[in-house]
Image (tube, rainbow, N blue to C red):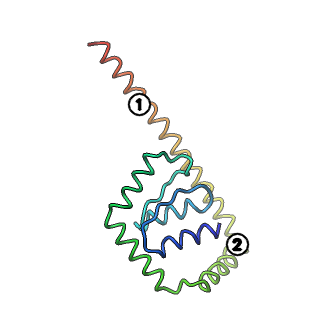
Amino acid sequence: MLLFFLHCLAALRSGVPTIVTPVFGDQYDNSFVVQKLGVGFGFERKLQDIDVKDLSNAIDVVLNDPTIAKRAKTVGSQLRDNEWDERAIVEEVETYWKETVTSGKFLDEVRDWNEATAERKSYYKKKTLRDRVTIGFALVAAIVAFLVK
């Protein structure tokens, strides 16, 4: 997972808007960070559930929103000018390991992450069902309107 974090960090350091299409693990967190920072577009759904239209819209937004480009450039500059070199990253990982993993806090974070993921999945299942019901009602209304004419 650290490798994926480093890829996200490299994208942020580049100062160029980015799009995150998560597949598993901390990629959902990376997606959240990109979205929260306003430096690109981060999907909440896994890559396999993203359709062409959604990806196309994300690309359009990232390419044509000057606010995103400006924010990405600012964040990239801050990261490049900051102390986040290789040594600082290794120190941060070591600190995280000592304070979080070996202390047992990591298991709590995993449980919290699993609960949050389950909530997101539940939300999208409900949303999908709601969308299908709405479309169904719209189709029935259209058929009835057509037949009544």
Give the camera-side residue of 103 and 141. Answer: 141
Point 49% across, 35% down: residue? 129
Point 48% across, 82% down: residue? 80
Q: Residue 12: percent from the left, percent from the top?
A: 48, 72
Q: Would you say 112 lies left or right of 40 here?
A: right
At mark 1, the secondary structure is helix
Of pointers 1 and 2, the one earlier in the residue sequence: 2
Point 43% across, 81% down: residue? 78
Res. 35 image quadrant: bottom left
At mark 2, the secondary structure is helix
The three-letter code of the residue at mark 2 reads: Val
Q: Circle 2 sits on which residue? A: 101
Q: Circle 1 sits on which residue? A: 135
Cα separation between marks 1 and 2: 47 Å
The circle on residue 22 is none
Mark 2, other Cα within 10 Å: few <14 / some 14–19 / many ≥20: some
Quadrant placement of the N terminus: bottom right
The three-letter code of the residue at mark 1 reads: Ile
Q: Residue 94: percent from the left, percent from the top?
A: 67, 80
